[in-house]
Amino acid sequence: MSHAETHSHDHDHDHKPKGFVKRWLMTTNHKDIGTLYLIFSLIMFIFGGALAMIIRLELFQPGLQFVQPDFFNQLTTMHALIMVFGAVMPAFVGFANWMIPIMIGAPDMALPRMNNWSFWILPFAFTMLASTFFMDGGAPAAGWTLYPPLVLQGGHNLAFAVFAIHMLGISSIMGAINVIATIMNMRAPNMGYLKMPLFVWTWLITAFLLIAVMPVFAGAVTMLLTDHYFGTSFFNAAGGGDPVLFQHIFWFFGHPEVYIMILPSFGIISEIIPTFARKPLFGYVSMVYATAGIAFLSFIVWAHHMFSVGMPLGGELFFMYATFLISIPTGVKVFNWVSTMWKGSMTFETPMLFAVAFIILFTIGGFSGLMLAIAPADFQYHDTYFVVAHFHYVLVTGAVFAIIGGVYYWIPKWTGNMYSERLGKIHFWWSVISVNVLFFPQHFLGLAGMPRRIPDYSVQFANWNMWSSIGGFAFGLAQIFFCIIVWRTIKGKGTSKATDRVWEGAKGLEWFIPSPAPHHTFQDGAPVNDEHLAHVSSH
Amino acid sequence: MSQTNTNNDQYYVPHLAKWPIVGSIGMTMTAVGAAIYMNNQFDSPIVMYLGFATLIFMMFGWFGEVIKESESNKYNPQVDASFRMGMIWFIFSEVMFFAGFFGALWYVRNMAVPWLGGEGTGVFTNTELWSGYEGVWPTNGPGNIGGKFELVDPFHLPLINTVLLMASSITLTIAHHALVDGARKKVIGWLIATVVLGATFLFFQVDEYIEAYQHLDLTLKSGIYGSTFFMLTGFHGMHVTLGAIMLTVITIRMMRGHFKPESHFGFEAVAWYWHFVDVVWLGLFIFVYII
Ligand code: HEM
Ligand SMILES: [Cu+2]
């Protein structure tokens, strides 16, 4: 191993630049940029979460209590846009920045200056997007899917939303290019592709998805822009266009997008489970193939979001069966995680608790997805709270739980301090109970016919909505608690110093460097020690 | 430290990037400036222009820094490989951007318009909403949006333009071979030829637009035909413009003695980009103009 020596004799390199501007605004260091991404993501979680709290407040009772319907629609739209593009995606890019170079023995990301830019576009883009709340006509209110013609009927927000999305797209594409170049070009000499940790693999595949679909999304919103401001007819039937065209383009982006939000989670879970089961990941290679298979299939299932829009029968059938196919590689993954735990000598520290909860609850979300994928059944479920329940199971108890689990798992490495295990466990149980109170009843509401994106509802839905809101407030509060835990860990309050290895069963390069990880880790492109890797297996 | 280090056996990791934040400010000013102008919230595009100027300033600064580092041998082959991958995947993202618009064209021609004309399940749409509409391409829709229009003759300007762009790809390849052979004068000559061909292409493209607007009544507002026609050719034209500027830059760099026969990534990146723009044009020529 080279890091320890380089670290001691090459002092210059560990000098962090002084002053806010140099340290953060002008940084090219993958760890600092990772930290920026993670902090930004946390801020966006709180912002997006606050909007969700207002939504749940309004839905606490039938009738209109607190907000006007139009503002309610702005809330649902902005909540989703902020959570998807501001919270979940940047969180994963933060993990990628922090962990990928360390995991593959690289000195930094391949294109460090561009890395800085990828991040520093985000705060500007979101300021623009959020500023629409204060404009004539308010924020976009047609849902995060931005369907025309509704979205074209808003006020001044369209241009801001579209340009913000362009900027997010540029940021994501640059981030993805960086990830690909880093993984393909910066691995330590003996770090073969099939020795890479699964988190690195899932991110590599995610990066391909990003580069393939973000530009398509940019094109779609550009068409919205020209339809609204320059008189084109892409989505105007009178001019020969078709609003459904937008849905096709949007979901061609949108479905891979949901996998962009889940594949890195799969990677994080695949790191956590073996550590606390003290067994190597079961079926490593099949995990890689399953990830690639999911990514490929994600390009040919998009119209399962459009079953009720009036597609030809052949289209309905094709997209239904193609969607079913995805459950095969997904099943492989779940099977492998469970098999990894099978007969493991397990302990349940907070990251593991979140990982186990992920497996169970994500699978529930996958099953409701399968129900939705049955085209004739979806005619009933579509645009009801059943869909809302589905995607919150996969995104909150899926993606977000993986993010939280990942933070607990690696924060000792990032900060050099152990979080408080007691507080972590409290946070876990508080979250896992409240999140189910929040989202499980939404299945019943949806099956009973409650439409999504409506601020008022018929009284028969009152009970479950009340429960859902109570769960929502509790879950929101739990995340404030999480912020406190993170803060205390960073400051080293009520915590102990982390060891280098941190977790007894941990394998992988990150566990063989000091905690906190030095500002620069690997510098000379020397081979890494095979004994430290989790996957050096037989081939 | 690697900043002061001119031997390049280590991967070059730059420190203290000042340009990205300038880029973000420029980008935001451009976006906000455009938005408030389009919304009539502000009656001048000045903010947008300022933002654009900031972006150009950023590019000069940023690329200038990279060129300086490159010319002082800070980059080893591994850094070069990162740049290559960056460019390849950037071009792939551009391919997907165009794919979105080509996909839209395919969809309206093969699905949306025939349905409006009563094909398949569109029978009632046609009889009840748009009776009498036949749904044949080219069309500006049942609402006759933008009024009657005529088409650009593909075998006039567009054909000439096809020849021009194809020729420019060839001249660029000749220049590249000359660079590998170390014949620098020849490189500059063929590069200038490439830029001239590209500029002529753009000239004709502008000519064609003027013709379309003034004589054919074909505008961006001519229903779906005008939308797809101008958006596809327009975005392509923007890319040709960008490519021509990049070609000019590398020509100037050649004149200043940059690039070596064995390492000239900047040159190659521009060449790839130019070939990509060429291929897109072929797609346009076939699917937009001819068919
Ligand atoms: C077995 C895997 C899955 C299947 C079969 C599936 C199926 C579906 C279907 C059919 C819909 C459309 C429902 C409707 O609008 O009527 C849908 C919606 C959705 N799914 Fe999934 N899904 C799966 C996994 C995921 C994952 C992993 C994510 C994200 C991490 C996800 C996120 C979403 C979202 C966000 C929506 C709602 C989009 C909207 O209309 O706003 N799904 N899913
Ligand atoms: Cu989907």
Image (cartoon, coloured by chain):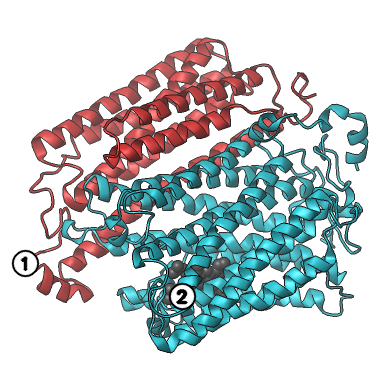
Q: CA distance from mark 1 to mark 2?
A: 48 Å
Mark nearer the viewer, 1 or 2: 2
Q: Choose between B34 and A538: the one closer to the eye.
A: B34
- Hue used for the chain lettered B: red
Nearest the viewer among A433 and A80 is A433
Q: Amino acid at mark 1?
A: Gly
Can residue A301 be seen?
no
Disc count in the image?
Answer: 2
For the point 57% across and 73% down, which residue is it? A472
x then y, percent, for residue A410: 78, 56
Tell me if mark 1 has few (under 14), some (14-19) or many (20+) residues whose alpha carbon lies within 10 angstroms of its own.
Answer: few
Q: Position of residue A331 (x, y in %)?
A: 64, 77
Chain letter for the residue marked with disc 1 in the picture: B
Residue pointed to by mark 2: A59
Question: Circle 2 sits in a helix, a strand or a loop, which is it?
Answer: loop
Which residue is at 62% across, 65% downward?
A399
Q: Give the x, y percent position of residue A283.
A: 76, 70
User: Which chain wears cyan?
Assistant: A
The type of residue carrying mark 2 is Leu
- In this view, the residue in front, A80 or B246, is A80
Placement of the C terminus of chain A among the 4 image quadrants: bottom right
Q: Which residue is mark 1?
A: B132
Q: Secondary structure at mark 1?
A: loop
Q: Quadrant of residue A242?
A: bottom left
- Residue A76 found in image quarter: bottom left
Q: Horizontal and vertical percent for residue B136? A: 15, 59
**Quarter of the image with the N terminus of chain A in it:** top right
Marks 1 and 2 share the same chain: no
Q: Is the residue marked 2 within 8 Å of ligand 1, measured from its CB?
A: no
Q: Is residue A252 above or below residue A177?
A: below
The residue under the point 37% across, 51% down is A221
- Residue placed most toward the observer, A241 or A461: A461
